[in-house]
Image (spheres, rainbow, N blue to C red):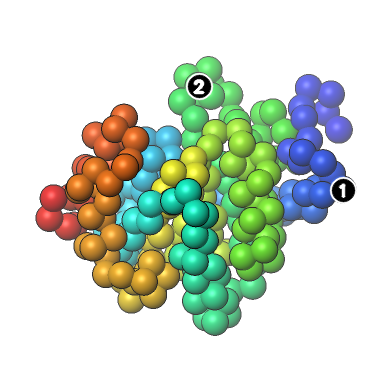
Amino acid sequence: MNQNKHPPWLDQAVDGGLFQASASDIASALSLRELYDYDYGIRFKGEAIHAQGWSVGFVKESATEDDSAFARFFQELSALGEADMLAIPAKAVRFELTGTHDVLDFFEPPLIANAKFDFASYVEIRSSMIQMIHGSFFVFPKSGRALLLNSSGKYAMFAGPRRLVEKIIDVDIEASWEAVRANDQLDPLLLPRLRPAIIAYGMSP
């Protein structure tokens, strides 16, 4: 272990098994984050979504901890044959401004999770340093056929083919964004950064 770096786990016996990504997995996670992260984990880049022909669904997290959309994300994609996933924190401005690399320069092994594609593994990731370091993080099957962005436990976005995303969020795409349009108990500091996403993803404001 490099003495200048820290292990990425909180307790090696509990979550150390998450951090066994291969060199190719690490490169894939870094590339995906570079492609899709917009505004440091606030949302996905609109141009990247359009390039894929994808839709984005919005889910506001509630005090009742309704995890049904997250569970459906894993159920639907597992049914399509997905078996493994990666997870990486969103970018953070404080690291970019200093020229350091959050997941590589400070952690050994890197702060990138490699896990079985299921909801139980997601819960482990959500309770790990992957979320704690910045708040927002990306989860995706290794095929990259869909994406999940969990933003600081306040809301989530699901990106992928429209029919798949609507199965996951259990409403149509446009209706899922009504919480943003109507300011439905969302952080008022986030709204000016979220509302442009509606147009960026091809919907009417």
Residue type at tag 2:
Arg
Kindly identify the residue that appears in the image at 46 percent across and 65 percent down: 69
Q: Position of residue 117 (x, y in %)?
A: 63, 67
Categorize mark 1 by other alpha carbons within 10 Å: few (<14), some (14-19), many (20+). few
What count of labels does the image hold?
A: 2
Q: Is residue 133 left or right of residue 11?
A: left
Kindly identify the residue that appears in the image at 31 percent across and 70 percent down: 171
**Quadrant of residue 168 within the rendered picture:** bottom left
Element class at badge 1: helix
Kindly identify the residue that appears in the image at 42 percent across and 35 percent down: 40
Element class at badge 2: helix
Using the numbered discs, state the Cα–Cα distance from disc 2 to disc 1 in whole angstroms.
30 Å
Kindly identify the residue that appears in the image at 49 percent across and 35 percent down: 91
Q: Is residue 170 left or right of residue 124?
A: left
Foreground residue among 160 and 143: 160
Q: Are marks 2 and 1 in contact (CB under 8 Å)?
A: no
Q: Is residue 153 left or right of residue 169?
A: right
Q: Is residue 35 visible?
A: no
**Quadrant of residue 9 within the rendered picture:** top right
Q: Is residue 70 above or below residue 188?
A: below
Residue type at tag 1:
Ala
Query: Which of the image's four quarters has the N terminus?
Result: top right
Mark in front: 2 vs 1: 1
Q: Is residue 166 visible?
A: yes
Indicate which disc residue 13 carries: 1
Foreground residue among 41 and 195: 195
State the residue position of label 2.
94
